[in-house]
Image (cartoon, coloured by chain):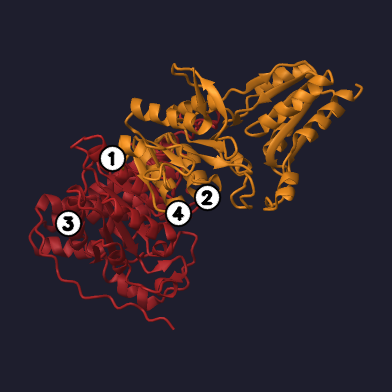
Chain colours: A orange, B red
Amino acid sequence: MAETLLFNALREAIDEEMGRDDTVFVLGEDVGVYGGSYKVTKDLYDKYGELRVLDTPIAENSFTGMAVGAAMTGLRPIIEGMNMGFLLLAFNQIANNAGMLRYTSGGNFKIPMVIRGPGGVGRQLGAEHSQRLEAYFQAVPGLKIVACSTPYNAKGLLKAAIRDDNPVLFFEHVLLYNLKEDLPNHEYVVPLDKAEIVRPGKDVTILTYSRMRHHVTQAVKGLEKKGIDPEVIDLISLKPLDFDTIGASIKKTHRVVIVEECMKTGGIGAEIIASINDRYFDELDAPVVRLSSQDIPTPYNGKLETLTIVQPKQIEAAVENMVALKV
Amino acid sequence: MVQERTLPQFQAPAAQISPDEGLLLYEDMILGRYFEDKCAEMYYRGKMFGFVHLYNGQEAVSSGVIKALRSDDYVCSTYRDHVHALSAGVPAKNVMAELFGKETGCSRGRGGSMHLFSSEHNLLGGFAFIGEGIPVALGAAFQSRYRRDALGDASADQVTACFFGDGTSNNGQFFECLNMAALWKLPILFVVENNKWAIGMAHERATSQPEIYKKASVFGMPGVEVDGMDVMAVRAVAQEAVARARAGEGPTLIEALTYRFRGHSLADPDELRSKAEKEAWLARDPIKRFEAYLLEHNLADEGALKDVRDRIQTTIDDALTFAEDSPEPSPDDLYKYIFAED
């Protein structure tokens, strides 16, 4: 076991996959000589050379499309979005081509590529650098969407994403890069489509992902003191959602709270509620509650920014209220 | 107001061609023309749906460029892609079946007129939105260089031909990709088919520099202007660009001056183009011109040309029968091909 920071766990994943498969390469802004703006590709340029760790000009849509063409013809590109928000500029290539092209080509081509990078609300980075993009992409057919949350799952999931034959949008959170964890010395991969039961419990199911997992974990400490026993599930896969795990939990607890950093309107939580109503309505003892970010561009001011996203105290209160409801 | 660009006087190509090569080019152009004429007929008879953009008049570009490629080279097209697919070797019956939405179509009925694909023929697609195929073509070219220079595969000298229109040359992806192609010396031909019109937008009204080939100079890339109604001229510049690309000397921008004889699509009333303009370009029909060239240089006689036309007519008739008789995709397969595992 070795203590590893999350950014380095991602770096190890890329290094190991580039070592085992020479069709894997990285491209993006400042991934090479500079080593990545969060050092996820540090030193890989020296190890693998300029074609395998390709510094691109600032031309998001074009280098994303270039990765699509490379993937169609047999390579396995990993795109780093220096900030995932920049990839809105690549929406055409991600949606029309990475997402749809296997289908519109009638199976002629596959598009094995990973689009990864930092996203989420950081610390006073301003609106454009503090976006929650997963909702924008969840409607695109043909994409897999994954959010990592710990050094362990970051490494194992990224390795699985690189090996996957489909386009995978891989969300990292800008405030989680310096999380530390002891990682196994042996090689491992983590399946892309399985939710992770962070804490088993019986009173209520809390569904969350990415950084909010850690806010939930904090809230759970307070809830435990009050004798409440929540089950915490880190969704990991935002598309497709793992309804086997979600459903099994609902059948046990009959109550659901969703905690997300996503915007409320048209968000991941909105989709989950609709799907739970479709599938498990009869299992519910109470309406599903979602705690989402405010539907506003993220303000720069620190106090306003804090008010924009869900805080542990709010999670604690919401869960307490739900458990107190008489059936 | 805007000045219309004067068509330059082109030098007659000195390139030599064998009778077999001549007939091959002729056959390819006839195939393109007859195929598109049949599409128009089928569309107006209600057998074909959606947006159908025909290539009539531009055949010298497709045949001149794609027939200068090897079969393992790549072709990337636009929404006006039927004839590029045919020149790349996709059988006419599979293209026709695709336009009929049949399971036997080259995209299994999921793509349609603007989304023709064939991995077998290295056809990277028809792309419906302006410019979106250019980065994809760049990726294929990057892949060739990657295999050769990062993986040490000396046989990886494949070239990519990327087609698009004059309207696209005002789009950001055009400039972004020219920059990257030149920067990394990628083996790619950017082939602008300047047919003067982007639906109803005259080229001169949309661009501050109508001579698109000159835009290559900014990137230190060779830019060539060629008579897109002369298959021999197109072939000559394509061969030179392919040789450069294959030798690792990088990309070329080719601007072929051409004209579409029909409207933007079969749904376009084509009200804006003047009769005089259309007649002037119709008089330069690349197929008639190439027929004259072949006869004049004793590369073929009337009988041989008629044989080609008869043979292609049969190919088109067979393609139509094949398309009509083919099954539709099964409703059970609605979700097939979303993911690689499907």
Q: Earlier in the sequence, mark 1 or mark 3?
A: 1
State the SS at label 3. Answer: helix
Query: Residue B98: x, y in percent?
Result: 42, 42
Mark 2 residue crowding within 10 angstroms, few (<14) / some (14–19) / many (20+):
some
- Same-subunit check for callouts 1 and 3: yes
Q: Which residue is mark 2?
A: A86
Q: Residue at x 35, y 48 (%)?
A: B137
Q: Is residue B288 above or below residue A179?
A: below
B9 and A280: which is toward the camera: A280
Q: Nearer the viewer, mark 1 or mark 3?
A: 1
Give left or right: position of A86 versus B163.
Answer: right
| Between discs 3 and 4, the one toward the N terminus | 4
The first of marks 4 and 1 along the sequence is 4
A43 sits to left or right of A217: left
Chain identity of mark 1 = B
**Label 3 vs label 4, nearer the camera:** 3
Residue position for label 4? B52
Amino acid type at circle 2 is Phe
Q: Secondary structure at mark 4?
A: loop
Rate crowding at label 3 as few (under 14), some (14 to 19) or many (20 or more) other CA atoms within 10 Å: few
